[in-house]
Image (cartoon, rainbow, N blue to C red):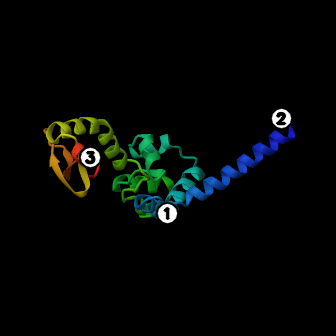
Amino acid sequence: MNHSMRNLLAILVVGLGFISAAHAGEHTSVVDSQALESYDHRKPTLDLANQAAHAKGLTLEALGHACNLLPIRVGAVLTGQAPLEKPSQTCLETQLGLTPGAMTPLATPPIRWQTGAIYRMHEAVEVYGPALQRWFNERYGDAIMSAIDFNVTVDETKGAKGERRIRIVFDGKALPYATDDGWRPAK
């Protein structure tokens, strides 16, 4: 690699470092801010637990075996992506040599960046949106659902097998697009 190519590569690497650092603190939504606050609240406990696991040479496999959990569940807890349930908390604190209650901050469900529930709602609209638009057109003609004259209700229902289900109802005004009458020149 010649000197000018090395310089260009160094400039790119340094520039990417600045871009990454700048974007790391950027909050583009309330969810991003809440997710960062959730992570900041959990981070000291995550650091404590992971340092203890490292110091004791405990793998996810070993912790999972000792606490009767799959290793990936232990990993999700120790990376802050899953809430820690009480029986698992007691076992992990014992295995890691932590004082009882040391891992309590990990008990609340984490708020995740643009994943989970938000991703699934986007997915539902992406998958079923074309069918919904077709139904709107069949029912209302060339129309859309307003997101301005709009409200959302959420409730819990039971499924056919008794499972807990989430019902989200979008209630928006049917808005027709302009017809030819709206596109005639002024007289």
> Mark 3 is on which residue type?
Arg
Mark number, residue 40: 1
Tell which of 146 and 28 is nearer to you.
146
Tell which of 138 and 92 is nearer to you.
138
**CA distance separating discs 2 and 1:** 42 Å
* Residue at the spot of label 2: 1
Dot 2 or dot 1: first in sequence order is 2
Tell which of 107 and 180 is nearer to you.
180
Side of 121 relative to 71 (left or right): left
Mark number, residue 184: 3
Instruction: Tell us which disc is closer to us: 2 or 1.
Output: 2
Q: At 23% across and 43% down in the image, what residue appears?
A: 180
- x then y, percent, for residue 139: 14, 39
Q: Is residue 104 above or below residue 4?
A: below
Residue contact between numbered discs 1 and 3, judged by CB atoms under 8 Å: no
**CA distance separating discs 1 and 3:** 58 Å
**Quadrant of the image occupied by residue 103:** bottom left
Side of 154 relative to 101 (left or right): left
Q: Secondary structure at mark 3?
A: loop
> Mark 2 is on which residue type?
Met
Q: Secondary structure at mark 1?
A: helix
